[in-house]
Every structure is written in C-alpha cells, then in structure tokens.
Image (cartoon, grey):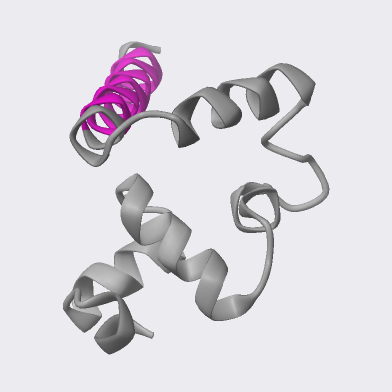
Amino acid sequence: MAEELKVSSTQYKNYERGDSFPYVDKLIAMCKILKVPADYLLKDEDRLFLDYSASYLFEELREMDDAQANMLFYVIQKLIEYKRLFEQNKDEAT
C-alpha cells in the first residue's frame, strides 16, 4: 500500500497506528485502492468518526482544489497534535 500511495513504509505504518494522518489526497487514494468510503477508514472502533455534519464538511472539501484541501488537513492535524500535547501535559500535572 505504501508503494501505491508513494509514501515510505514507515509513514504508512504511522498512518496505521494513528501516529500521523494522511493528507486528503492520500486518504482519497486509499479509499480508491481499498474501494471503501472515507468514513470506513476514519472510524474509531465502534464509534464512527464522521457524523452528518462532518459528512457535509467532506462534501465541501471535495470542492476545494488540492492546495486548499491539503492546507485544511494540515490545520486539522495540528489541532489534533495540540490536543494530544494538552492531554499529555494535563496527565503529567496530576
């Protein structure tokens, strides 16, 4: 899969573990390769990551050009990283 996505095997393993997230273009490529919808790849165990409002946002995302979509995804990744750091610092303080 890493070869098809044109990413290193290390990067792909990071995707699998949830240590990092693919940019939108890679996520779309994964969906095409695996022939599954994006929500299938984005669910967390039994809890579906995408709800109706997030699905609406995905529709808006599809209308963006690659540069806009990648920038948005970058911002989301940074927010997730910030959340993880916040939670880590909170746990260390207790």
- Say if residue 30 shows up in the picture: yes
**Vertical placement of 17 versus 52: above or below?**
below
Q: Which corner quadrant holds the C terminus?
A: top left
Q: Which of the 4 image quadrants contains residue 41?
A: bottom right
Q: Is residue 7 magenta?
A: no
Q: Is residue 88 magenta?
A: yes
Q: How many marks?
A: 0
Horizontal side of 5 relative to 36 (left or right) equals: left
Rendering coords of residue 80 (x, y %): 36, 27
Horizontal side of 32 relative to 68 (left or right) equals: right
> Which secondary structure is most common in the magenta stretch?
helix
Q: Nearer the viewer, residue 87 or 94?
A: 87
Q: Nearer the viewer, residue 85 or 64?
A: 64
Q: Which of the 4 image quadrants contains residue 14?
A: bottom left
- Say if residue 21 shows up in the picture: no
Q: Which of the 4 image quadrants contains residue 73?
A: top left
Rendering coords of residue 37 (x, y %): 68, 57
Rendering coords of residue 70 (x, y %): 24, 37
**Vertical placement of 30 versus 58: above or below?**
below
Residue at (31, 72) in percent of width and height? 12
Q: Which residues are magenta?
A: 71-92
